[in-house]
Amino acid sequence: MLKWDDVLNYAKNGNLAPTKRVEKTEEEWKELLSPESFAVTRLHGTERPHSSDMCSKFEEGIYACICCGTLLFDASEKFESGTGWPSFTQPIEDNAVNHIADHSHGMTRIETTCSTCDAHLGHVFPDGPQPSGLRFCMNAVSLKKVAEE
């Protein structure tokens, strides 16, 4: 189980190798994605809080990267964080997401990106429920539900 110390270690010393890599040009991403998904995933934007009904849906299933289809989160790890963004306690695999120190906006946070295609997903925080204590706060437009369990 991934814990906060693991996240900090990856952000400082490097992430686990991804299972595969997907690389496209900016133009290729623009053709594949909606303008909002492109702005969030490729330009490191953030969607407005409470702008997606994904926050309030807790059906079984798997969430994948909207850009490359890499499986990222299982709905069994999803919880209501009250933040306005879908939140999860763990990724499907430790190497599914990268953890990157983000010093923007006058603060230090840990950004999460898809390890396969580098899509910006959101951030991870140490204020989630136990046993992991993690809150992967994701932009809904960076995810797509791809499978029922």
Image (spheres, helix red, strand yellow):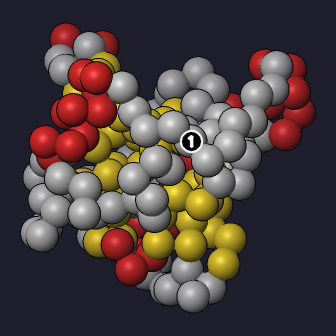
Q: Which residue is mark 1?
A: 18
- Residue 58, by quadrant, is bottom left
Q: Residue at x 65, y 54 (%)?
A: 70
Relative image position of residue 142 (x, y in whole percent):
58, 47
User: Can residue 111 be seen?
Assistant: no
**69 w.r.t. 26: above or below:** below
Residue type at mark 1? Answer: Pro
Foreground pick, 89 / 35 = 89
Residue 111, position in %: x, y? Answer: 36, 31
Q: Residues within 10 Å of mark 1 (few under 14, many from 20)?
A: some
Q: Residue at x 13, y 59 (%)?
A: 133
**Vertical arrangement, residue 48 with respect to residue 59, above or below:** above
Q: Residue drawn 76% across and 28% down?
A: 23
Residue 42 in sight here: yes
Q: Indicate the quadrant containing the N terminus: top left, top right, bottom left or bottom right.
A: bottom left
Query: Where residue 8 sits: x, y (%)?
Result: 19, 33
Describe residue 100's horizontal placement relative to residue 64 as left or right.
Answer: left
Residue occupying image coordinates x 13% and y 42%: 5
Q: Quadrant of residue 71?
A: bottom right
